Image (cartoon, rainbow, N blue to C red):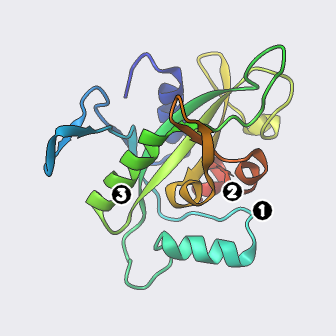
Amino acid sequence: MKKNNQYERAFEAYMQFLGLPCLATREQKRNLIDENPDDSLKNFDFIVSSHQISAPKSWSESEGTNYLNELSIGKKESSLPPIWLIDIKGRKFPSGFKSPQYWRNWIAEEDLLCLTRWESFFGLNFHGLFVFVYDVCGPKLPVPEHRLFTFEGTRYAFFAVPLIIYRDHKRNLSQQWQTVTMPTDLFRKYAVSLDEFFK
């Protein structure tokens, strides 16, 4: 975790508020990949364990069942609780002033590839999770006001998108900057407020 990163510090405080075990990683180091020593793998930010997750009402029943099955939730052969490899993405809500934009959710393609690799390295019960931490700086709120989390004088909202879902619905945003994003309507459908996701 970067101590000067407000979004990561807010997330860690929120996990403490929710009473969930949370371990920060050493982000400044990149781990070498054995099969290619000249390459490196970007670290994720946190490891969090949760006993149970909940699919939001915005997912259809079949989608919810399929995704929860892919995440090994509720499977008999998977008796251990899910463990989340979390990559934090801090964004303003809204971003910009002349043309405010809500629900910005872009990530670097490298983030997607590295989190996928980490998930495969750790194996069963370990799942990649993007958590978008929104600095709520305008009158429009992403969640009801009583569910905002205030940390060091700033209001935050936290939304989770499992790696498998982001990967299924991403589209290219900028070839120059090598970024991808989810269309706003799909992001609002699949992103889950953390206080609902970690139940």
Q: What amino acid does circle 2 point to?
A: Tyr
Tell me: residue 37, above or below residue 121.
Answer: above
Sequence-wise, the earlier of marks 2 and 3 is 3
The Cα atoms of the two marked residues, 2 and 3, are separated by 20 Å
Front residue (pair 76, 199): 76
State the SS at label 2.
helix
Tell me: residue 188, above or below residue 132.
Answer: below
The Cα atoms of the two marked residues, 3 and 1, are separated by 26 Å
User: Residue 145, which numbered label?
Assistant: none
Mark 2–mark 1 contact, CB under 8 Å?
Answer: yes
State the residue position of label 3: 119
**Placement of the C terminus among the 4 image quadrants:** bottom right
Sequence-wise, the earlier of marks 3 and 1 is 1
Front residue (pair 82, 112): 112
How many numbered circles does the render carry? Answer: 3
* Mark 2: few/some/many CA within 10 Å (<14, 14-19, 20+): many
Q: What amino acid does circle 3 point to?
A: Glu
Is residue 21 in sight in this rendering? no
Q: In x, y percent, where is residue 17?
A: 55, 39
The Cα atoms of the two marked residues, 2 and 1, are separated by 7 Å
User: Residue 190, which numbered label?
Assistant: 2
* Mark 1: few/some/many CA within 10 Å (<14, 14-19, 20+): some
- Based on the displayed image, in which of its 4 quarters is residue 83 positioned? bottom left
Is residue 28 in sight in this rendering? yes
Q: What amino acid does circle 1 point to?
A: Ser
Mark 2–mark 3 contact, CB under 8 Å?
Answer: no
**Placement of the N terminus among the 4 image quadrants:** top left
State the residue position of label 1: 58
